[in-house]
Amino acid sequence: MATHAPEVPTTAPAPRHAPGPSEPSTQPTTTEPSLQDSPTKPSLQVRNAAQVLSQSSNAVFFGGAGVSTESGIPDFRSEAGLYHAEHTYGHSPEDLLSVTFAGENPELFFTYYKENLVHLSARPNPAHQALANWESNGPLSAVITQNIDGLHQAAGSRTVHELHGSIWRQYCTRCHERYTLEWTLNPTNCREPNHVVPQCPACGSMVRPDVTLYGEALPEGVMEASAQAIAAADTMIVGGTSLAVYPAAGLVDFFRGSTLILINTSPTPLDHRADIVITQPIGRAMEDIRSLLDE
Ligand SMILES: [Zn+2]
């Protein structure tokens, strides 16, 4: 037992990417897709991810638009989404979904919103289902999502931090009365002449979706709760996001655990910080990891 304090405190957390492999020791850091792997055989990266998760006691998942696109929900921020918005509505998605625009041109805001962000027929895909399963039966403690479609809850996830709100909640901009999505989609609850802008019957003001518009702050407390969940985790899976925009990249900075797993169809700016990079669609990757864990 040391009687003198060492020069370097041994209790200080080691840098996550100190020289030498992280646990498990066989785990490579690579961004190369495994071209030799057959379509039915999980890649080395997928098998490593499954091994890490099998030993994890507190994992978190952070997901972006790619998680929803595999349920048939187009990404309005994509190139196709940008073209569609400008071609059909005469504005970019950032304009159409800004708090200023919603106030000045609510008819066009709600027309675009209802036609492009509300997808009632979308159903959870294997990525949503795997995460719900790992929360009920495994190591997952929380899902943090940039998506607003509620598909994680539809799959059975219970601890879901929605960074940008949800299409399933609406409130009156004046009296704050709450309304359901179905109610706002009913034209008889929307004001004349276009019957697209929901109008509060209690006070006559506009009823808006509880989603974060461009120019607005994120919902109170959700960033803090997300950061806390990430800071407490030993494993973080980031999926379906290019990690190019705030707050995605910033949230990863809160991670202090041992293994960062990135799953995306294309490279991200944080690939070099990840321990495992899986270059695959998120649904397929999560389904493969789940199959290995269930073996
Ligand atoms: Zn009201």
Image (cartoon, grey):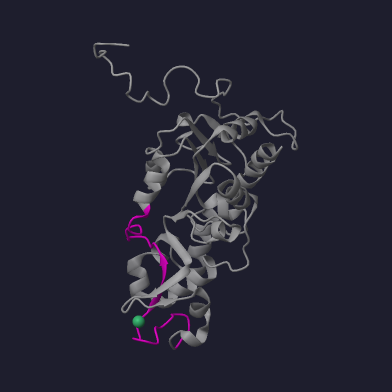
> Is residue 245 something that shows in the picture?
no
**Residue 106 drawn at (x, y percent):** 39, 76
**Residue 135 drawn at (x, y percent):** 55, 48
Stretch of the chain drawn in magenta: 193-222
Residue at (37% x, 23% y) in the render: 14
Q: Quadrant of the N terminus?
A: top left
Please state which of residues 91 and 173 is positioned toward the viewer in this rendering.
173
Q: Decide whether residue 202 is among the magenta residues.
A: yes
Majority secondary structure in the magenta region: loop
**Residue 24 drawn at (x, y percent):** 55, 24
Q: Decide whether residue 208 is among the magenta residues.
A: yes
Residue at (61% x, 49% y) in the render: 133
Asked if residue 211 lies left or right of residue 80, the reply is left
**Residue 278 drawn at (x, y percent):** 59, 35
Residue at (45% x, 74% y) in the render: 110
Asked if residue 250 lies left or right of residue 124, the reply is left
> Is residue 10 something that shows in the picture?
yes
Look at the picture and state if 69 lies above or below 18: below
Please state which of residues 81 and 75 is positioned toward the viewer in this rendering.
75
Asked if residue 24 lies left or right of residue 173, the reply is right
Please state which of residues 72 and 133 is positioned toward the viewer in this rendering.
133
Asked if residue 156 lies left or right of residue 260, the reply is right
The image quarter containing residue 200 is bottom left
Q: Quadrant of the C terminus?
A: top right
Which of the four quarters of the rendered structure image does ligand 1 lie in?
bottom left
Look at the picture and state if 187 lies above or below 126: below
The image quarter containing residue 45 is top right
